Amino acid sequence: LWDEEDADTDNDGVDDNSELGAEFYSESANIHVSGDDSYEIYLNGQLVGSDNGWQIAENYAASLRIGKNVLAIKGINDADGTHPGALIASLTANCTEALYTDSSWLLSRQYKEDWQSLEGSLEGASAATEWGGVESGPWWDTSTEQGASNFPMDSLAKWIWSDGLETHPTVYVRKEFYFTEPLNSDTDCDGYSDIDEVNSNSDPLDANSIPR
């Protein structure tokens, strides 16, 4: 069966939901994130931050790169089956929400070396499970909690975890993304496909930057 989440409309080897569009590209970004009970977040293999208080989200400044980027999060639930664990994140670039947690993110419960790195991968990955939106309980479902959350309440982000919301103590999630066009395999119209430019470290958004 055809899966919309895995669609590659322009046949460039990258899923549509991983191509965010050239209009979102910026050298800098802001990342809002929270995890119940705690998290570690990485961008392109580098630790961005960590925290263990889900009630108030953190906001981190981050630098994006041309071509492929990877946002990866380790989620930890210390509840031992007494309450759910979940994480939520949103990345804003050019004053617009460009990326957010949902079921298009890959998830694994198994640690794998370099799972968070640019060229890494998850062991036995499957789709993350969505457990509600920004205003869903048992997290920020009251106006008081929403006001104190420090998370953008208009975000499309979902709280995600494995299917064992209360029983799985640790998850690893990652999302690979590009600022290329999902409906055009050659975003900058220079005669070279986006994926060829990414693989050769040229800029798929700049027609003057071509593979050498």
Image: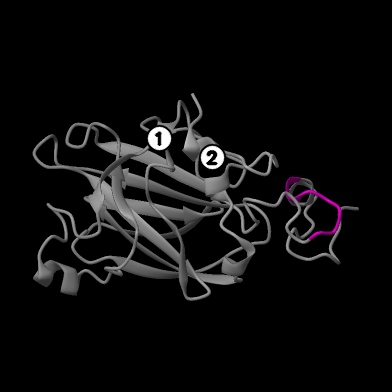
Is 199 colored magenta in this rendering?
no
Look at the magenta stretch and give its main secondary structure. Answer: loop
Disc 2 target residue: 114
- Camera-side mark, 2 or 1: 1
Disc 1 target residue: 127
* Quadrant assignment, res 49: bottom left
Nearest to the observer: residue 184 or residue 174 = 184
Question: Dot 2: few (<14), some (14–19), or many (≥20) neighbours within 10 Å?
Answer: few
Residue 117 makes an appearance in the image: no
Secondary structure beneath dot 1 equals strand
User: What are the residue bounds of the magenta stretch?
Assistant: 189-195
Q: Position of residue 174 (x, y in %)?
A: 46, 44
Q: Residue at x 43, y 43 (%)?
A: 105
Secondary structure beneath dot 2 equals loop
Question: Dot 1: few (<14), some (14–19), or many (≥20) neighbours within 10 Å?
Answer: some
Q: Position of residue 22 (x, y in %)?
A: 64, 64
Q: Residue at x 11, y 70 (%)?
A: 143
Q: Label 1 near label 2: C-beta < 8 Å?
A: no
Q: CA distance from mark 2 to mark 1?
A: 19 Å
Going by the numbered disc 2, the residue's amino acid type is Asp
Q: Is residue 176 left or right of residue 33?
A: right
* Quadrant assignment, res 31: bottom left
Q: Residue at x 83, y 51 (%)?
A: 192
Q: Can you name the residue that lies furthest to the right here?
A: 212
User: Measured along the vertical axis of the image, is residue 115 above or below residue 140?
Assistant: above
User: Measured along the vertical axis of the image, is residue 112 above or below residue 199?
Assistant: above
